[in-house]
Image (tube, grey):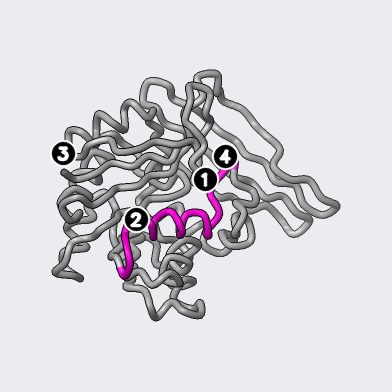
Amino acid sequence: MDGYGSETYGEHFAPVYDEWYGADGGLAVTRIGSPDEVADAVAALAGPAGRVLELGVGTGRLALPLADRGLAVTGLDASPAMLDRLRAKPGADRLTLVEGDMAEPAAVATGIADDTFDVVLVGFNTFFNLTSEAAQQSCLGGVAALLAPGGRFVLEGFVPAPEAHDGVTVRDVSIDRVMLNVVAIDEEAQTITGQTIEMTSDGNRFFPYVLRYATPDQLDAMAGAAGLEVADRTEDWRGTAFTDDSPTHVSTWVLP
């Protein structure tokens, strides 16, 4: 997708993100954890007053509940529009917010804090917004550099479906609006290039996205190359056992 950069997703989706996804995931294609589920799980890993870095913090769907639990939260995002919306929310002054590319989190985060983090979190498929294997590997290297010894990296993502194919799906139909999702899949590159299209009597709006998906095994290999070890994997934030049929996963790696 010509002209697509690290900030493109956020700049297009920021005006509708809270409305569409909200606390329960809303129009998300895959199931995602609620803010309270995520915050409780991360707080248990980080410990009292633990330091948490969220990559792709967006409009604060997870960061604000994390701060509610007494954690010191830093949020990184490449989109100025997402960060502006977060800064306007009550309680955002408790967060340390930084504009930057999560493909190189260490280069950004070490400029804002001398300490390392107890947990680095990337929720709701956000890791796959890194559109190449090289960018994903770079991110994991940066994560390892930012974690305290024994610190955890936690990733929430979908499990790629081998039967997925190019096509159009209907997301929502109402009396004055139709929403479609149009995707093209490149199996060799492991990319999904898509548009969410909102059609109304006032005109159409386009919300582009590009994802580079990876299987749990591929994520384990990349994390291992960065010096991280597998600690846990469940299907969801409630601790459901992960199986070969699980559509999503919450994976945790530890820095020895």
Q: Earlier in the sequence, mark 2 or mark 3?
A: 2
Residue ID for mark 3: 227
Residue displayed at 35% across by 51% down: 6
Q: Dot 1 corresponds to which residue?
A: 238
Q: Position of residue 26 (x, y in %)?
A: 64, 52
In the rendered view, tell whether residue 159 sits above or below residue 45: above
Question: Of discs 1 and 4, which sits in the foreground?
Answer: 1
Which of discs 3 and 1 lies nearer the camera? The answer is 1
The residue to which callout 4 is attached is 30
Instruction: Report which residue position mark 2 lands on.
Output: 55
Q: Which of marks 1 and 3 precedes in the sequence?
A: 3
For residue 194, above or below residue 162: below
**Depth-wise, is mark 1 or mark 2 nearer the camera?**
1
Q: Residue at x 44, y 25 (%)?
A: 186
Say which element carries label 3.
loop
CA distance separating discs 4 and 2: 19 Å
Q: Is 123 covered by the magenta stretch?
A: no
CA gap, disc 2 and disc 3: 19 Å
Secondary-structure class at tag 2: strand
Query: Percent from the top left, x then y, of residue 67?
Result: 41, 71
CA–CA distance in space, label 1 to label 4: 16 Å
Q: Amino acid at mark 1?
A: Arg
The magenta stretch is 29-49
Q: Identify the residue at horizontal 39%, vertical 67% (top origin).
A: 80
